[in-house]
């Protein structure tokens, strides 16, 4: 006759919940499915071509120059219009120039003119587009007057200056974000 040994009752009670837990886990081991990603709404490009981006950025830059020139002509005027045409470094630079004119009692006469504009590149970031330009500005028709009304412009001042400009375009607006003198000053004479 076979020998039957019984498990002590408390070990049997401890094993029962373990068996139930293992059975429950085995029942849950079906293949886990990750839900498919929600369809993303593709962002439509703001411009249908580089030419369209260049045209829009050029218009935005001309508006920037007009606003800054108007504020330099009357530095005590309300400068809130500056925030509609500039952001970031361009806003800081323009604000600093206006503050310098006020501090020194200077007055700007005339308007800068864009002589040449060339598209460097267009970068798309989510819903914003950065348009990089090379521009050549003429100050031939511009004078700067001191507090006494006399010109403070040096006779050797170059009439043409090349700049690298970045314009940020969003669905709401186009604003100049950066404007730095371009190292290739030959650009204006080409």
Image (cartoon, rainbow, N blue to C red):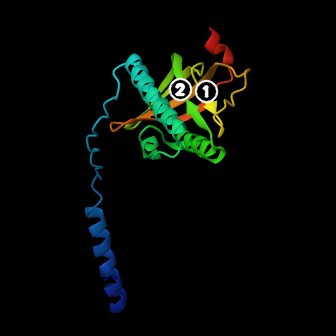
Residue 189 visible in the snapshot = yes
The furthest residue to the top: 190
Please tell me in which quadrant of the rendered image residue 175 appears.
top left
> To which residue does mark 2 refer?
110
Q: Residue furthest bottom?
A: 9
- Which residue is depicted at the point 57% across and 42% down? 98
Q: Position of residue 113 (x, y in %)?
A: 52, 21
Circle 1: element type: strand
Q: How many marks are shown on the rendered structure?
A: 2
Query: Where in the figure is residue 2, as x and y percent of width and height?
Result: 33, 81
Disc assigned to residue 172: none
Considering the image in quadrants, where does the C terminus appear?
top right
134 vs 99: above or below: above
User: Badge 1: few (under 14), some or many (20 or more) residues near its Cα, within 10 Å?
Assistant: some
Q: Dot 2: within a 10 Å radius of its alpha carbon, few (fewer than 14), some, or many (20 or more) residues?
A: some
Which residue is depicted at the point 30% across and 66% down?
25
Q: CA distance from mark 1 to mark 2?
A: 7 Å
Q: Which residue is mark 1?
A: 143
Does the rendering let one see residue 5? no
Which quarter of the figure is the N terminus placed in? bottom left
The answer to the question of whether label 1 and label 2 lie on touching residues, with beta carbons closer than 8 A, is yes
- Viewer-proximal residue among 12 and 19: 19
Q: Residue at x 52, y 19 (%)?
A: 114
Where in the figure is residue 104, as x and y percent of width and height?
Answer: 66, 44
Q: Quadrant of residue 11?
A: bottom left
Percent of width and height locating residue 169: 41, 33
Depth check, front residue: 11 or 164: 164
Residue 114 in the image: above or below residue 127: above
Q: Secondary structure at mark 2?
A: loop
In the displayed structure, does residue 161 sit left or right of residue 41?
A: right
């Amino acid at each position: 006759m076979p020998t039957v040994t019984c498990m002590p009752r408390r070990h049997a009670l401890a094993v029962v919940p373990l068996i139930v837990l293992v059975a429950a886990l085995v029942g849950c081991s079906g293949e886990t499915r990750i839900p498919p990603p929600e369809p993303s709404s593709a962002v439509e490009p703001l411009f249908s071509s580089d030419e369209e981006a260049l045209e829009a950025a050029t218009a935005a830059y001309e508006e920037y120059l007009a606003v800054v020139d108007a504020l330099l002509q009357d530095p005590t005027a309300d400068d809130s219009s500056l925030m509609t045409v500039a952001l970031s470094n361009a806003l800081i630079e323009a604000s600093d120039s206006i503050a310098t004119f006020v501090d020194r009692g200077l007055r700007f006469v005339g308007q800068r003119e864009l002589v040449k504009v060339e598209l460097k590149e267009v970068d798309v970031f989510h819903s914003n587009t950065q348009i990089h330009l090379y521009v050549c500005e003429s100050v031939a028709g511009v004078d700067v007057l001191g507090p006494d009304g006399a010109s403070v412009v040096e006779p050797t001042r170059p009439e043409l200056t090349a700049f690298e400009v970045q314009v940020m375009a969003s669905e709401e607006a186009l604003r100049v974000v950066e404007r730095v003198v371009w190292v290739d000053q030959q650009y204006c004479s080409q």
